[in-house]
Image: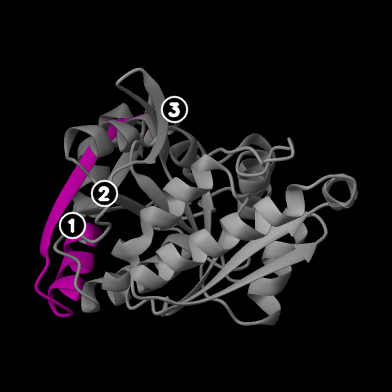
Amino acid sequence: MLSRFIVATDLSPASFAIVRSLAGLKAFGARQCLLLSCLSLGESTAMALSLSHGVLESNLQKQKRILEEHGFVTRANTVFGFAKTEINRIAESQGYPLIVVGSHGRTLIGSDLLGGVASAVIHHATKPVLVIRLGVKEEEGEVRIQAGRGDFSRHILFPTDFSDNAKHAFTYLESAIADSASKVTLMHVQDKTRIDPHLTHRLEEFNEIDRARLEEMKKVLEARGNARIEIELSYGTPFAEIVRTVTERDVRLVMMGSQGRGFIKELFLGSVSHNVARHSEASVLLVPAKR
């Protein structure tokens, strides 16, 4: 299901960290990669007036070799246009089922890419988007950018609100199980803001219903592979509970739908999934709703 993927690169140190972290995608059946560098009109003009083109091309080829060393058949390409538009357009027109972006970065010629663009890609994507968590670490007096927890298949957290988009995202989780995930935690958070105070007396009833739903999902996954499946039912603010669980349970990948209940509200105010992508210590795979 995720056999081919696009990696959006701005050729920054952050994007090198992303490329180095992607070997774990092989566990999900990934085999082919398009390494995509997007240059805006301003960037292409700046290159025409400088010597940066050779540096950019050299770095693109270095990243291509890293991906090939991971075992991916890799093609590298530079296109001109707005990254947020071109990345989604190429994924759609060329049938790439996965887009990989980072949580921040900066190009060699100065403009932001893997920050605001990552957010824009997520909002407009029709394909799943893997947001690689990047962190900063100081070693021997040097500041290094590195990707967060790798080995995506070691422990996957799947939060669900039982919406149609969550059900669609579950089909990707089923595929991941078939392609060798080791451990999965199925999670539902009873949203305190919807329950407290008027429905607090029904919390036990809600828990019983939703635990049964999670148990049914567990049975489906157990029939697909040998992963250890656990269930987590909690009460509080959904994105905060999810982020807490990521930290406490050493989660390596959060997989979830990118729109849940109340799509219009989430579209304008920022959804639970997008907040998780911003704050999670693990990388996050967001699956958009069917359109």
x and y, in percent, of residue 220 in the image: 20, 75
Numbered badge on residue 214: none
Q: Nearer the viewer, residue 236 or 58?
A: 58
* Up/down of 142 relative to 217, above or below: above
Residue at the (67%, 46%) spot, across then down: 117
Residue at the (34%, 68%) spot, across then down: 70
Could you say whether the residue bearing mark 2 is in a helix, strand or loop? loop
Q: Nearer the viewer, residue 289 or 201?
A: 289
Numbered badge on residue 193: 3
Neighbour tally class for label 3: few under 14, some 14-19, many 20 plus, Cα within 10 Å: few
Please give the residue where the numbered disc 2 appears in the rendered image. Answer: 252
Classify the position of the C terminus by image quarter.
bottom right
Q: Is residue 288 visible?
A: no
In magenta, the rendered stretch is 213-237
* Marks 1 and 2 in Cβ contact (< 8 Å): yes
Q: Earlier in the sequence, mark 1 or mark 2?
A: 1
- The answer for how far apart the CA atoms under marks 1 and 2 are is 6 Å
* Up/down of 148 relative to 30, above or below: above
Left or right of 272? Residue 183 is left
Q: Earlier in the sequence, mark 1 or mark 3?
A: 1
Q: Residue type at mark 3? A: Thr
Frontmost of labels 1 and 3 is: 1
Left or right of 150? Residue 6 is right
Classify the position of the N terminus by image quarter.
bottom left
- The answer for how far apart the CA atoms under marks 1 and 3 are is 32 Å
Please give the residue where the numbered disc 1 appears in the rendered image. Answer: 154
Q: Is residue 166 visible?
A: yes
Q: How many marks?
A: 3
- The answer for how far apart the CA atoms under marks 2 and 3 are is 28 Å
